[in-house]
Amino acid sequence: MTQLQTLIEEIPKYQPGADLDLIQRAYRFSELSHQGQQRASGEPYLSHPLEVAGLLVNFKMDVTTVTAGLLHDVLEDTRATKDDLKREFGPEIADLVDGVTKIGKLAFSSREERQAENFRKMLVAMARDLRVLMIKLADRLHNMRTLDYLPPDKARKIAQETLDIYAPLAHRLGMAKVKAELEDLALRVLHAEDYGDLMRRVAKRRLEREAEINQLIAILQEKLGEVGIESKIAGRPKHFYSIWKKMHEGGREFDEIYDLTAVRVLTNTVRDCYGALGVIHSLWKPVPGRFKDFIAMPKVNMYQSLHTTVIGPKGDPVEIQIRTWEMHRIAEEGIAAHWLYKERKSDRDKFDEAFTWLRQLLESQTETSDPKEFLDTVRLDLFPDEVYVFTPKGDVKALPEGSTPIDFAYAVHTDVGHRTVGAKVNGRIVPLHYRLANG
């Protein structure tokens, strides 16, 4: 089956009645426009827009967005004009392609004033139509997958930009799978030796811990069944960049990172999530200060789950996430999970909520003419789920939002975490479950 046939078969599964003729016309237009062009890999250029369209289908984007994905490079790399696109496909698709083209021309490694202006242009494009960013993320993801064919200097520049701009944007939109893959692909280019070493060490450790994780899953599956909670339980490996970051920015040794494989429990209802948590804590002792309730208090990117860490069957800490199937869909797909269903009030509310940060960010830009201040605001807003904590020696540790003094102690060193019995924040004694905050 060709890639075009796959697109035509998959879109109606989530968007019945979609105008599939648009896809066929866009394919022919793109094929003709890119005729004779090749990718750095030697493949026909058309392979790239087809891959981008395929990713957009994976995101379950509407047929208009997929069509624009097939056409996303014609204004930049061929003789086609925006007027040509308007005539053939209408103003909506022409505007989407034009928006992607403009974002593609922005440089984020230049001097501060230029960088601030380019951030503003990108945010304005996103505010007008978020589908522009969805196409750009798909474009960037496929380009990152094929970086090996580019000269090393160019590959490193693209990888760094991805880590600085596109991975945080994917995170802000709740697209966990896209964010994780972008970060891992960037790490492979920017720190190739570290990446290779990490792959080998992680594979070895996972093999060592596989029996314990499987034993925990089997026990939990049986106990949940006994109390009538339907569930799916599986191991979930951490992606390489998050491990590398803990080692290089958190100052931890590889052997001090115990959560290389987490366990994920999927249930049908919120009530079952809390029921499963009760079963887990009755089976294994929870680690103090490691429980987080993101169901009652969702993250700003719509993420919801219960997080806990327990001492597993063999005495090692095991991180467990519990969420419903719907929460899992949103955690994996983020804003894309709501795209086709904006007419439903619950989805429309969540969709509007996801845009609030962007509107506020643009308003803050109009209030300041200082490029550095605006850039700082953007960076803080792209990483809203982190708090920055100073050690007594003046070192800074970046921790997830909702972290406690116990989390901070373990970030300093495992032995410090084990020995911690009390905490002071800004000279004031606080309980170990105190939530750390910026400022």
Image (tube, rainbow, N blue to C red):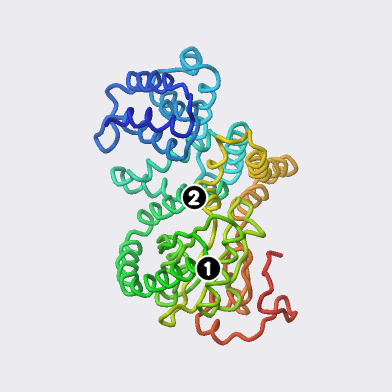
Q: Residue at x 55, y 22 (%)?
A: 92
Please give left or right for residue 174 compared with residue 402 in the image. Answer: left
Write the residue at 44% across / 77% down: 256
Question: Residue 56, position in %: x, y?
Answer: 44, 36
Residue neighbourhood size for the residue with mark 1, other residues' Cα within 10 Å, grouped as few (<14), some (14–19), many (≥20): few
Q: Position of residue 129 (x, y in %)?
A: 59, 32
Q: What residue did someone put label 2 on? A: 332
Q: Amino acid at mark 1?
A: Val
Q: Residue at x 40, y 35 (%)?
A: 52
Instruction: List the residue tagged with mark 1.
Output: 227
Three-letter amino acid code of the residue under disc 2:
Glu
Q: Please give left or right for residue 169 compared with residue 127 in the image.
A: left
Real-space Cα separation, disc 2 to disc 1, in angstroms: 28 Å
The numbered mark, 2 or 1, whose residue comes first in the sequence reads 1
Residue lying at 67% horizontally and 69% vertically, measured from the top left: 436
* Of the pair 343 and 25, the residue shown nearer to us: 343
